[in-house]
Image (tube, rainbow, N blue to C red):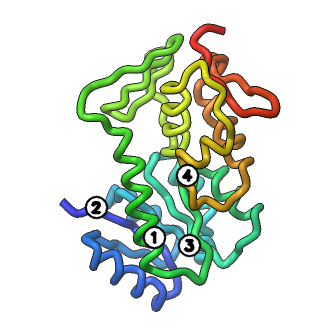
Amino acid sequence: MNKKVLLVEDEARIREVIADYFIENGWDVHEADNGQDALLWFDTLHPDLVILDIMIPQMDGFEVCRHLRKRSGVPIILLTAKAADQDKISGFELGADDYVTKPFSPKVLVARANALMKRVESNHVPEAHMLTFGSAVLNRMAHRLEVGGAEVELAPKEYDILLYLLLHKGAVVSRETIIAKIWGIAFDGDSRVVDSHIKKLRGKLGYESRHIRTVVGSGYKFEEET
């Protein structure tokens, strides 16, 4: 079955070109030209990926991203004409997984979408594998986190960071390493995006956030016992 992408872009010509490239690469494409329709389509389609322009009518892309993150961990790629680091940081803090600045090559956008999906899918291991710490359980097969018996929904990057830290427990992991492993070596944003994701992750973990230590000047470290 083909993967489904929800493409949210108000400029018809740009939307058409992007859609054509994704269709040629085996994706099922569904389109929206404003923020409110995007949320309605999302609830109907349950897409595998959302490509979201920031400057769209009725509800801008940042607001749509915020709403999506409240209900889903679906991968999100933001499109924007703004290249300022603060705009990128704002998008990542809202839970976006990638950020593409206009003008861009549709071929590159498709390639980045495919790479993002591969990273997300790589965390779905074929056999059940439970990682536990304190009252928390991370089920790699179900891509599910429970804390104190209650499910906690994580954005894709939050899940990836937690899994990476768990798999490297006891080791100090630098922000640069996290960016390279989670965002990819092509990421050109600010390393502070790691701090903002860790902050959100800690908030969701509650008491179990005690396992994630900040190592001043170096990065982060996951400790089994604290």
Q: CA distance from mark 4 to mark 1?
A: 29 Å
- Between disc 2 and disc 4, the foreground one is 4
**In the figure, 56 relative to 152: above or below?**
below
- Between disc 4 and disc 1, the foreground one is 4
**In the figure, 180 relative to 126: above or below?**
below
Q: CA distance from mark 2 to mark 1?
A: 20 Å
Give the quarter of the figure containing the C terminus. top right
- Between disc 2 and disc 1, the foreground one is 2
Q: Which residue corresponds to mark 3?
A: 53
- x then y, percent, for residue 44: 33, 59
Q: Which residue corresponds to mark 4?
A: 183
- x then y, percent, for residue 209: 64, 22
Q: Which residue corresponds to mark 2?
A: 3
Query: Considering the numbered disc 4 on the image, is that residue within a helix, a strand or a loop?
Result: helix
Q: At 34% from the left edge and 72% from the top edge, which residue is drawn?
A: 30
**In the figure, 58 relative to 212: above or below?**
below
Left or right of 129? Residue 14 is right
